[in-house]
Amino acid sequence: MNTSSRGRVIAVIAVALFAAVASGYWWGRSRQQVPVTDAATEAQDQRTALYWYDPMVPDQHFDKPGKSPFMDMMLVPKYADGGAGGGIRIDPDLRRSLGVRTVVAAPGLLEAGIQVPGTLAWNLREEHLVEARVDAVVDRLHVRAPFERVRAGQPLATLVAPEWSTAIAEARAVGQGISAPARDLRAAAAARLRALGIPPGARLLADGRVMLTAPATGIVSEIGARQGEAAPAGTLLFRVNGDDRIWLEAAMPQAGLAGIVAGTPAVATVDAFPGKTFRGEVEALLPQVDRDSRTQQARIVLDNPGGLLAPGMFVQVTLEPAAAKTYPLVPSNALIGSGDGARVIVQAGDGSFKPVPVQVGRSSGGLTQILSGLEGGERVVASGQFLIDSEASLSGALQRLDPGTADDGHAQDQSP
């Protein structure tokens, strides 16, 4: 074969190879595009498409399928029944790699025990005042320093108070008579003692002075006059506070008030006494809310064995509210906050996802009550929910999503 014939043969072979490669490339491209074209999808789905749109630009509508002029992707149909052919699509491998999982929103009660801080104060129901209701002079102080512990009946001070001395002497004198007039005088003398405000337990000494005694066992928290001073009528001489039971004022957040009523058990701990607990109960929720912290004061009465607790101590108190109504419980980190409330991502029975607005209640132990929005038993996305929520936003379905617009079965339950 000469040189020119050999060249013609080579040229023919090259053209044939090029044609074979081109036809193979075209056939392969057509095979790859068939599964993702909207024409194939519409052949399988006989629903009426209102329009087509690009999930990245959901406000732009098109009257026929095709490729998006904005992104390198096919347009998605919007059907008359509210469904979207594309929906929310998240690759299962991507979900597994990101740890997307779901949990059941089961109805139940939150863990008992709401822990809040508080401060100790005197129990004013066990406070006693010793006052001079008439002009007097403090002749002697038997208790000289504040915060001394006293017993009921223990001498506190000796006063020179002529009006008191006279009234006590008269009452003692008529108290010995047994006649009817004497009985009338005794009643009049007792009325005079009350009118002069002589403290219970006051005793008239032989020299005419009056000794005042402690009205109860407790702590002398205040001394209002010194030895040798004049004590005009109305002077506070002593303030005695009982310390068998002490008040705890705890700031309760509004979300934790459910189930807290008078009589609710309380257990307090103090850093000064590690391992020791002090028990009591709620006496009342005070009808005032702090403007800044939005908390309400709970007055708790604690037992104070041995007088270990003192006013001003900072304590931690755990309240055990009474059992309340059961609500669906979800992990607190499953909630997605927004300007108009909160929502969770719920997985439907067909594997699709949808955002559901919810009203939340109290939180405790990593769980939150759902007051409305869920009925219980739904599967809620507990981790990776922000990925699904952002995917819903990209598809233009966040605010108008309903059961027909969720993902069409591509998402499967990944709960452990």
Image (cartoon, helix red, strand yellow):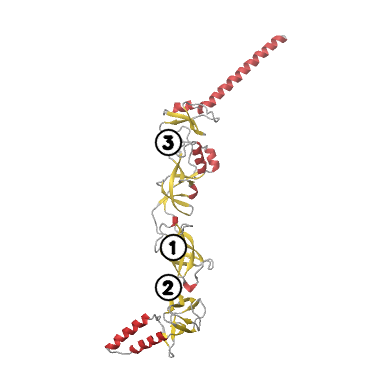
Please report whichever mark, 1 or 3, sits nearer to the chain's N-terminal start: 1
Q: Quadrant of the N terminus?
A: top right
Residue position marked by numbered label 3 in the rendering:
404
Pair 3/2: label in front: 2
Residue position marked by numbered label 2 in the rendering:
126
Q: Is residue 182 above or below residue 259?
A: below
Q: Residues within 10 Å of mark 1 (few under 14, many from 20)?
A: many
Q: Is residue 34 left or right of residue 168?
A: right
**Foreground of the two, 370 or 216:** 216
Residue for point 48% across, 65% down: 268
Contact between marks 1 and 2 (CB within 8 A): the answer is no
Q: Is residue 163 visible?
A: yes
**Foreground of the two, 160 or 370:** 160
Question: Residue pushed farthest right?
Answer: 3
Residue position marked by numbered label 1 in the rendering:
298
Contact between marks 3 and 2 (CB within 8 A): the answer is no
Say which element carries label 1.
Answer: strand
Say which element carries label 2.
Answer: helix
Please report whichever mark, 3 or 2, sits nearer to the chain's N-terminal start: 2
Q: Is residue 66 above or below residue 157?
A: above
Pair 1/3: label in front: 1
The CA span between labels 1 and 2 is: 18 Å
The CA span between labels 3 and 2 is: 67 Å
Q: Is residue 385 above or below residue 164?
A: above
Q: Position of residue 182 (x, y in %)?
A: 30, 88
Q: Position of residue 276 (x, y in %)?
A: 50, 67
Question: Residue pushed farthest left?
Answer: 180
Residue for point 56% across, 22% down: 27
Q: Is residue 55 visible?
A: no
Give the amino acid at mark 2: Glu
